[in-house]
Amino acid sequence: MLNGFTAVYLREMWILKRRIKRQLLSMSVSPLLYLIAFGYAMGEGATFDGHTYIEFLIPGLVAMSSMTQAFVISTDINVARFYWHIFEEFQAAPISNAAYVAGEVLAGMTRGFISVGVILLIGLCFNVFLDYGNLFFWLAIGLNSFLFASLAVWLAMLVKSHADQAMLTNFIITPMAFLGGTFFPVERLPVWAQNIIYLLPLTHAAAVIRMTAFDTPPDFFSYLLLLVIGVIFFFAALKCVDRARD
Protein backbone atom coordinates (compact mmCIF):
# COMPACT_ATOMS: atom_id res chain seq x y z
CA MET A 1 0.00 0.00 0.00
CA LEU A 2 2.82 2.40 0.88
CA ASN A 3 4.38 2.24 -2.59
CA GLY A 4 1.01 2.81 -4.26
CA PHE A 5 0.21 5.72 -1.96
CA THR A 6 3.60 7.30 -2.68
CA ALA A 7 3.15 6.91 -6.42
CA VAL A 8 -0.24 8.63 -6.41
CA TYR A 9 0.93 11.45 -4.15
CA LEU A 10 4.19 12.09 -6.01
CA ARG A 11 2.35 12.21 -9.33
CA GLU A 12 0.12 14.98 -8.01
CA MET A 13 3.12 16.82 -6.55
CA TRP A 14 4.97 16.58 -9.86
CA ILE A 15 1.99 18.15 -11.62
CA LEU A 16 1.81 20.86 -8.94
CA LYS A 17 5.53 21.56 -9.32
CA ARG A 18 5.11 22.09 -13.05
CA ARG A 19 2.34 24.62 -12.37
CA ILE A 20 3.63 26.11 -9.13
CA LYS A 21 4.06 29.70 -10.35
CA ARG A 22 0.54 29.86 -11.75
CA GLN A 23 -0.84 28.10 -8.68
CA LEU A 24 0.81 30.55 -6.27
CA LEU A 25 -0.51 33.46 -8.30
CA SER A 26 -3.99 31.95 -8.31
CA MET A 27 -3.83 31.37 -4.55
CA SER A 28 -2.84 35.01 -4.01
CA VAL A 29 -5.34 36.91 -6.14
CA SER A 30 -8.60 36.24 -4.30
CA PRO A 31 -7.27 36.77 -0.74
CA LEU A 32 -5.56 39.96 -1.85
CA LEU A 33 -8.77 41.30 -3.37
CA TYR A 34 -10.77 40.36 -0.27
CA LEU A 35 -8.28 42.09 1.99
CA ILE A 36 -8.32 45.26 -0.11
CA ALA A 37 -12.09 45.34 -0.71
CA PHE A 38 -13.33 44.19 2.69
CA GLY A 39 -10.36 44.88 4.94
CA TYR A 40 -9.72 48.43 3.85
CA ALA A 41 -12.77 49.68 1.96
CA MET A 42 -15.42 48.17 4.26
CA GLY A 43 -13.57 47.38 7.46
CA GLU A 44 -12.11 50.76 8.31
CA GLY A 45 -12.66 51.35 12.02
CA ALA A 46 -14.60 48.11 12.57
CA THR A 47 -13.49 45.97 15.50
CA PHE A 48 -14.51 42.52 16.75
CA ASP A 49 -13.61 41.50 20.30
CA GLY A 50 -10.74 43.94 20.33
CA HIS A 51 -9.38 42.95 16.90
CA THR A 52 -9.50 44.95 13.69
CA TYR A 53 -11.57 43.66 10.81
CA ILE A 54 -8.44 42.70 8.84
CA GLU A 55 -7.26 40.63 11.82
CA PHE A 56 -10.71 39.05 11.92
CA LEU A 57 -10.64 38.44 8.16
CA ILE A 58 -7.25 36.71 7.85
CA PRO A 59 -8.22 33.54 9.80
CA GLY A 60 -11.47 33.37 7.83
CA LEU A 61 -9.51 33.53 4.57
CA VAL A 62 -7.21 30.80 5.91
CA ALA A 63 -10.21 28.54 6.52
CA MET A 64 -11.80 29.37 3.15
CA SER A 65 -8.62 28.97 1.12
CA SER A 66 -7.59 25.69 2.77
CA MET A 67 -11.09 24.43 1.92
CA THR A 68 -11.14 25.57 -1.71
CA GLN A 69 -7.57 24.55 -2.52
CA ALA A 70 -7.97 21.13 -0.91
CA PHE A 71 -11.16 20.66 -2.91
CA VAL A 72 -9.40 21.60 -6.16
CA ILE A 73 -7.85 18.11 -6.20
CA SER A 74 -11.20 16.95 -7.57
CA THR A 75 -10.49 18.87 -10.79
CA ASP A 76 -7.18 17.07 -11.33
CA ILE A 77 -8.84 13.72 -10.64
CA ASN A 78 -11.55 14.40 -13.21
CA VAL A 79 -9.05 15.57 -15.81
CA ALA A 80 -7.15 12.33 -15.22
CA ARG A 81 -10.38 10.34 -15.53
CA PHE A 82 -12.09 11.96 -18.48
CA TYR A 83 -9.23 13.31 -20.61
CA TRP A 84 -5.93 11.58 -19.82
CA HIS A 85 -7.46 8.26 -18.72
CA ILE A 86 -4.82 8.00 -15.99
CA PHE A 87 -7.43 6.77 -13.53
CA GLU A 88 -7.86 3.53 -15.48
CA GLU A 89 -4.09 2.99 -15.36
CA PHE A 90 -4.12 3.39 -11.59
CA GLN A 91 -6.93 0.86 -11.36
CA ALA A 92 -5.03 -1.60 -13.55
CA ALA A 93 -1.86 -1.18 -11.47
CA PRO A 94 -1.34 -3.06 -8.20
CA ILE A 95 -2.54 -0.06 -6.16
CA SER A 96 -5.24 -0.53 -3.56
CA ASN A 97 -8.24 1.77 -3.33
CA ALA A 98 -7.07 2.93 0.09
CA ALA A 99 -3.65 3.88 -1.31
CA TYR A 100 -5.21 5.78 -4.20
CA VAL A 101 -7.66 7.72 -2.02
CA ALA A 102 -5.04 8.45 0.65
CA GLY A 103 -2.58 9.73 -1.97
CA GLU A 104 -5.14 12.05 -3.54
CA VAL A 105 -6.36 13.30 -0.16
CA LEU A 106 -2.83 14.08 0.99
CA ALA A 107 -2.21 15.91 -2.29
CA GLY A 108 -5.30 18.01 -1.63
CA MET A 109 -4.15 18.71 1.91
CA THR A 110 -0.75 19.80 0.63
CA ARG A 111 -2.43 22.32 -1.65
CA GLY A 112 -4.44 23.56 1.31
CA PHE A 113 -1.35 24.12 3.44
CA ILE A 114 0.47 25.90 0.62
CA SER A 115 -2.45 28.29 0.17
CA VAL A 116 -2.43 29.03 3.90
CA GLY A 117 1.24 29.94 3.71
CA VAL A 118 0.46 32.35 0.87
CA ILE A 119 -2.32 34.03 2.86
CA LEU A 120 -0.17 34.40 5.97
CA LEU A 121 2.58 36.05 3.91
CA ILE A 122 0.03 38.43 2.39
CA GLY A 123 -1.26 39.16 5.89
CA LEU A 124 2.24 40.11 7.01
CA CYS A 125 2.36 42.62 4.16
CA PHE A 126 -0.81 44.13 5.66
CA ASN A 127 0.88 44.24 9.09
CA VAL A 128 -1.32 41.49 10.52
CA PHE A 129 0.56 39.49 13.14
CA LEU A 130 -1.42 36.77 14.89
CA ASP A 131 -0.51 33.61 16.79
CA TYR A 132 0.49 31.31 13.94
CA GLY A 133 2.81 29.19 16.07
CA ASN A 134 -0.06 27.60 17.96
CA LEU A 135 -0.22 23.83 17.36
CA PHE A 136 -4.03 23.87 17.47
CA PHE A 137 -4.05 26.51 14.72
CA TRP A 138 -2.31 24.12 12.33
CA LEU A 139 -4.33 21.15 13.56
CA ALA A 140 -7.54 22.97 12.63
CA ILE A 141 -6.15 23.72 9.17
CA GLY A 142 -5.10 20.09 8.76
CA LEU A 143 -8.52 18.75 9.71
CA ASN A 144 -10.27 21.28 7.48
CA SER A 145 -8.03 20.35 4.54
CA PHE A 146 -8.48 16.63 5.23
CA LEU A 147 -12.26 16.97 5.33
CA PHE A 148 -12.58 18.86 2.05
CA ALA A 149 -9.92 16.86 0.23
CA SER A 150 -11.80 13.69 1.20
CA LEU A 151 -15.05 15.28 0.04
CA ALA A 152 -13.35 16.23 -3.23
CA VAL A 153 -12.18 12.66 -3.90
CA TRP A 154 -15.61 11.28 -3.03
CA LEU A 155 -17.48 13.64 -5.33
CA ALA A 156 -14.89 13.16 -8.07
CA MET A 157 -15.69 9.46 -7.96
CA LEU A 158 -19.43 10.13 -8.32
CA VAL A 159 -19.62 12.65 -11.15
CA LYS A 160 -19.98 11.58 -14.77
CA SER A 161 -18.42 14.64 -16.40
CA HIS A 162 -16.26 17.67 -15.72
CA ALA A 163 -19.35 19.88 -15.98
CA ASP A 164 -21.01 17.94 -13.15
CA GLN A 165 -17.99 18.67 -10.95
CA ALA A 166 -18.24 22.40 -11.65
CA MET A 167 -21.92 22.31 -10.73
CA LEU A 168 -21.17 20.63 -7.40
CA THR A 169 -18.55 23.27 -6.66
CA ASN A 170 -21.07 26.03 -7.33
CA PHE A 171 -23.72 24.45 -5.10
CA ILE A 172 -21.50 23.25 -2.23
CA ILE A 173 -18.17 25.06 -1.98
CA THR A 174 -19.08 28.57 -3.11
CA PRO A 175 -22.05 29.07 -0.72
CA MET A 176 -20.04 27.61 2.16
CA ALA A 177 -17.15 29.98 1.42
CA PHE A 178 -19.37 33.01 1.96
CA LEU A 179 -21.66 31.70 4.70
CA GLY A 180 -19.16 29.82 6.88
CA GLY A 181 -18.18 32.69 9.15
CA THR A 182 -15.26 33.76 6.97
CA PHE A 183 -16.27 37.38 6.39
CA PHE A 184 -18.61 38.12 9.29
CA PRO A 185 -19.33 36.96 12.85
CA VAL A 186 -21.98 34.26 12.74
CA GLU A 187 -23.25 35.46 16.13
CA ARG A 188 -24.62 38.64 14.54
CA LEU A 189 -27.13 36.69 12.45
CA PRO A 190 -30.63 35.73 13.61
CA VAL A 191 -30.78 32.57 15.70
CA TRP A 192 -32.50 30.57 12.96
CA ALA A 193 -29.73 31.50 10.50
CA GLN A 194 -27.04 30.61 13.04
CA ASN A 195 -28.58 27.18 13.51
CA ILE A 196 -28.36 26.53 9.78
CA ILE A 197 -24.85 27.92 9.33
CA TYR A 198 -23.52 25.87 12.26
CA LEU A 199 -24.38 22.78 10.23
CA LEU A 200 -21.60 23.73 7.80
CA PRO A 201 -18.18 22.23 8.62
CA LEU A 202 -16.40 25.37 7.40
CA THR A 203 -18.16 27.35 10.13
CA HIS A 204 -16.49 25.22 12.79
CA ALA A 205 -13.14 25.32 11.00
CA ALA A 206 -13.21 29.11 10.69
CA ALA A 207 -14.21 29.45 14.36
CA VAL A 208 -11.37 27.35 15.79
CA ILE A 209 -8.79 28.76 13.37
CA ARG A 210 -9.79 32.26 14.44
CA MET A 211 -9.79 31.34 18.15
CA THR A 212 -6.31 29.86 18.02
CA ALA A 213 -4.99 32.73 15.88
CA PHE A 214 -6.31 35.11 18.57
CA ASP A 215 -4.66 32.96 21.25
CA THR A 216 -7.95 32.03 22.93
CA PRO A 217 -8.98 28.50 23.99
CA PRO A 218 -10.67 26.71 21.04
CA ASP A 219 -13.82 24.63 21.11
CA PHE A 220 -12.55 21.04 20.96
CA PHE A 221 -15.96 19.77 19.91
CA SER A 222 -15.34 21.49 16.56
CA TYR A 223 -12.09 19.54 16.15
CA LEU A 224 -13.89 16.29 16.84
CA LEU A 225 -16.68 17.20 14.43
CA LEU A 226 -14.23 18.02 11.64
CA LEU A 227 -12.40 14.74 12.22
CA VAL A 228 -15.56 12.62 12.22
CA ILE A 229 -16.97 14.24 9.07
CA GLY A 230 -13.60 13.94 7.35
CA VAL A 231 -13.35 10.24 8.16
CA ILE A 232 -16.89 9.67 6.87
CA PHE A 233 -16.02 11.42 3.58
CA PHE A 234 -12.77 9.44 3.32
CA PHE A 235 -14.52 6.08 3.64
CA ALA A 236 -17.27 7.26 1.27
CA ALA A 237 -14.54 7.94 -1.30
CA LEU A 238 -13.15 4.45 -0.73
CA LYS A 239 -16.55 2.91 -1.41
CA CYS A 240 -16.96 4.85 -4.65
CA VAL A 241 -13.60 4.14 -6.31
CA ASP A 242 -14.75 0.87 -7.89
CA ARG A 243 -18.00 2.52 -8.97
CA ALA A 244 -16.03 5.23 -10.78
CA ARG A 245 -14.06 2.60 -12.64
CA ASP A 246 -17.26 0.95 -13.82
Image (cartoon, helix red, strand yellow):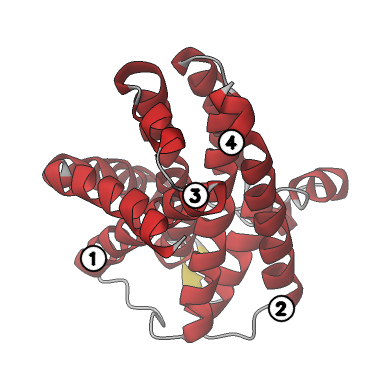
Give the spatial CA distance, label 4 vs label 2.
32 Å
Q: Secondary structure at mark 2?
A: helix
Of residues 68 and 231, which is closer to you in this image? 231
Q: In terms of image quadrants, where is residue 23?
A: top left
The residue tagged 1 is 121
Mark nearest the camera among 4 and 1 is 4
Q: Using a 10 Å C-alpha cutoff, classify the residue at mark 3 as few (fewer than 14 neighbours), some (14 to 19) or many (20 or more).
A: many
Q: Which residue is mark 2?
A: 220
User: In the rendering, which numbered label is found on residue 176?
Assistant: none
Alpha carbon of mark 4 to alpha carbon of mark 1: how far? 37 Å
Q: Work out which quarter of the rendered image holds the C terminus and state it.
A: top right
Q: Quick check: 211 left or right of 130? A: right
Q: Which residue is mark 3?
A: 67
Dot 4: element: helix
Circle nearer the N terminus (3, 1): 3
Crowd class of label 2 (few under 14; some 14 to 19; many from 20; radius 10 Å): few
The amino acid type found where label 4 is placed reads Val
CB under 8 Å between discs 4 and 1? no
Q: Nearer the viewer, mark 4 or mark 2?
A: 4
**Where is residue 38 shown, x and y percent of the image?**
40, 47
Looking at the rendered image, the disc whose residue lies closer to the viewer, 3 or 1, is 3
